[in-house]
Amino acid sequence: MSKIFVDACLGKETPYTPVWMMRQAGRYLPEYMRVREEAGSFLELCHDPKKAAEVTLQPVDIIGVDAAILFSDILVVPDEMGMDLSFVKGEGPKFSDPIRTQEDLDRLVKGKEVADRLTYVYDTIKIVREELRDDIALIGFCGAPWTLATYMIEGQGTKTYNICKKMMYSNPELLHNILHEVTQVVKYYMEQQIVSGVDVVQIFDSWAAAIEPSKYDEFSWRYMVEIADYLKSKYPDTPIIMFPKGISAFVERGWVYGNFDVFGVDWGTPMALAKEKLGDRYVLQGNMEPCRLYSKEATTECVESLAETMRDGRHIFNLGHGILPDVPVENAIHFVNECKRASKRS
């Protein structure tokens, strides 16, 4: 089974640089909205393997990417740990029972038992694997322990992270206990995604920028590396992508390390800097500001700049974060076509 995307992740020579987009399935696609309405709610869509598989496959057929990314949500993990998750229209995800004490943490389900509850995710993977073309890779994913912990502690999305960071500085032992337990769950969860049929796994740390650079390794990166080490020890040929958003200072200071294959470069980190600091050790992906998709000209300009910067490096085209819900579909298709045009090798 030959997959250009997998080979590119492993740093192998490929005929062209593959492309995919974070949050490929979503509100910008009318086809997605139809399935979402049929499902009844976002969480019900995540729990319905047939519908989740359908929206996973849509971007492959509609916009022509080289890899499908599993449709799910990072918060299914704390949900199955026993927290009460709901998605409130206009407000996003909320937990009615946030974790603020050791007693709160002790009441949660732990370890492999949580991973065993996520059968609907594995069933989605199996359906997608059966229907996906052999030359298209399937990417599984999870949230990084820090990003998951922010929702679990704050109880919802936040702009200040003040409850999490109060814990970080005043009760670091409790925060580490939370991060440890989440890390153990994620290890088994990602392992089961691999067993179920994903070709590549990605660990998202969407809220990495909430941590000051000198504390980032202690409270996030080392837990991501622990997950990667566990997976690589058992599945050495499965590529692992790390995507921490907003840590250019961490990159610049040379603090990135670990046994993984691809480093996702967010749109706020200069690609030239990432190439200088990391290009000899990891394949780089991403970097385009998602808002450039509102303009075909701005998209082409960035694609050509990235192609030139990475001309003698190892790169996978992607956005520097998720695609936005009001991006025209034709502009997303234009991005994919431009990436393939710019990266063809004679």
Image (cartoon, grey):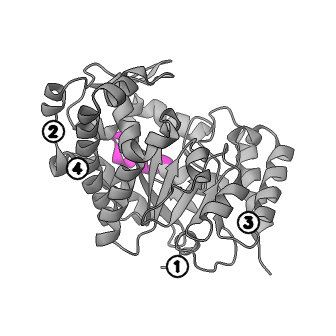
Task: Quickly name the residue at label 2.
Answer: 109
Q: Judging from the image, what secondary structure is the residue with disc 1 in?
A: loop
Q: CA distance from mark 4 to mark 2?
A: 10 Å
Q: Position of residue 340 (x, y in %)?
A: 74, 65
For the stretch drawn in magenta, the main secondary structure is helix
Q: Nearer the viewer, mark 2 or mark 1?
A: 2
**Is residue 52 highlighted in magenta?**
yes
Residue on which disc 3 sits: 310
The answer for how far apart the CA atoms under marks 2 and 3 are is 45 Å
Mark found first going from the N terminus, 4 or 2: 2
Q: Is residue 188 left or right of residue 70?
A: left
Mark sitting earlier along the chain (2/3): 2
The amino acid sitting under disc 2 is: Val
**Residue 28 against residue 285 in the figure, above or below:** above
The stretch in magenta equals 46-55
Looking at the image, which is closer to me, 148 or 218? 218
Report helix, strand or loop for mark 4: helix
SS of the residue under disc 2: loop
x and y, in percent, of residue 225 in the image? 38, 57
User: Circle 3 — which element?
Assistant: loop
* Labels 3, 1: front one: 3
The CA distance from mark 3 to mark 4 is 38 Å
